Image (cartoon, rainbow, N blue to C red):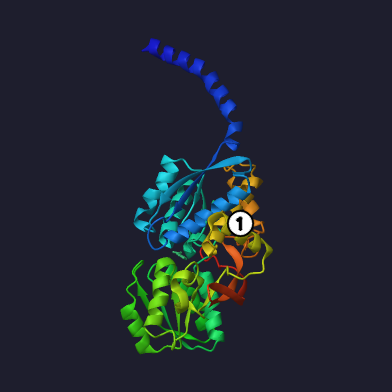
Amino acid sequence: MKRSLLTLAAVLALAAPTALVHAQATKPATNTSKLKVGLMLPATGTFAALGTAIENGFKLYITEQGGKLSGREIEFFKVDDESDPSKATDNVNKLIKRDNVDVLVGSVHSGVAMAMARVAKDSGTLLIVPNAGADAVTGPMCAVNIFRSSFSNWQPGFAMGQVVAAKGHKRVVTIAWKYAAGDESVKGFKESFEKAGGQVIKELGLPFPNVEFQALLTEIAAIKPDAVYTFFAGGGAVKFVKDYAAAGLKRTIPLYGAGFLTDGTLEAQGADAEGVLTTLHYGDSLTVPRDAAFRLAYAKTFKLQPDVYAVQGYDAAQMLGIGLAAVKGDLSKKAEFAAALRKAKIDSPRGAFTLNAAHNPVQDIYLRQVLGKENKVIGVASKSLADPGRGCRM
Ligand code: BEZ
């Protein structure tokens, strides 16, 4: 026994200096090693095109920086999250535990993003949300290592409530997918619309990603409200706009929506979307110099016109770049990374924006109207709109 203890001590004594030398030799390399970025986005299902646009935008910014941020080359790891919240925790753990990513970027669906935020908060992994608007992510779930480059579900809804009230509509029916994004978009709309004297007389809903709208459209026709407010996106938005027109409602009851209703969808919606008014933090006819350069580069690279999702992906990469520059590539400096982003003015194609204390964009929400194949910006519905960040304690 004594002999084996002595042997162990001798082994440790010999091993210790070697381990020390090894640690010293590898230490400087941590800041110049490849930065592992985990992209958790939908590649299949109704939000697949949104995931592609985000990835394109993100990669475009990295390419513009010569493929590196703060001297670190970027290595991508990808998971198709299928916009399925029930698989989200396993999916995000694959990126963290199997692939050892330094940064998580995702996702589109609010339910998936909430699962990601839970894991990011527990593990301390940096998370940048490039779409999902779940209010909780920059509300009760807020954290020093969680940021959003997009919007909160409350923001476009709240802005549209003011627009619809100003148009003189009094009785409105809402229709949306019944999950965080739809519920919170309607809640934001209702908050400002009812404060201005309007009334939401019926809230209709169907489970995500269901697109069987017929029975609900029949109900809207029977109620005859002054207007309809809606939240749908991606493939579901295409079908909703077409079904609304086919049911004859477009001629009789004005349709309003959070801008996802007509963003990235106009080719498929065609004339059925013409004239629809929506609110969003991006549009097709902005006179922002950064936007002109972005649109040109995006179209040249991907042979596609960009949309709001591409902008949010581009800005997620910009935000990562700003934070990394402040910590000279060392992501363990979380407080310094966050401090740099909190005071940054992010030069986005949507127009410059800042972050609120909960790390959600403070941004102009535009009023847009579909004219041909464009979401033409016809005004600012809400200037520098900050999400209230309810429940965030940091
Ligand atoms: C969401 O789930 O938060 C969402 C999905 C698509 C567009 C906008 C929001």
The one of 264 and 173 positioned closer to us in this rendering: 264
Q: Quadrant of the N terminus?
A: top left
* Residue 179: image location, x then y, percent: 39, 67
| 293 to 156, vertically: above or below | above
Say what amino acid the circle numbered 1 marks: Ala
Q: Which residue is mark 1?
A: 297
Q: Secondary structure at mark 1?
A: helix
In the image, taking residue 232 as reference, residue 75 lies left or right, namely: right
In the image, taking residue 345 as reference, residue 166 lies left or right, namely: left
The one of 18 and 181 positioned closer to us in this rendering: 181
For the question of whether residue 129 can be seen, the reply is no
- Residue that appears at 36% across and 87% down: 221
* Residue 251: image location, x then y, percent: 44, 87
* Residue 335: image location, x then y, percent: 60, 48
- Residue that appears at 41% across and 49% down: 79
| 168 to 154, vertically: above or below | below
Quadrant for ligand 1 reads: bottom left
Q: Quadrant of the C terminus?
A: bottom right
The one of 382 and 342 positioned closer to us in this rendering: 382
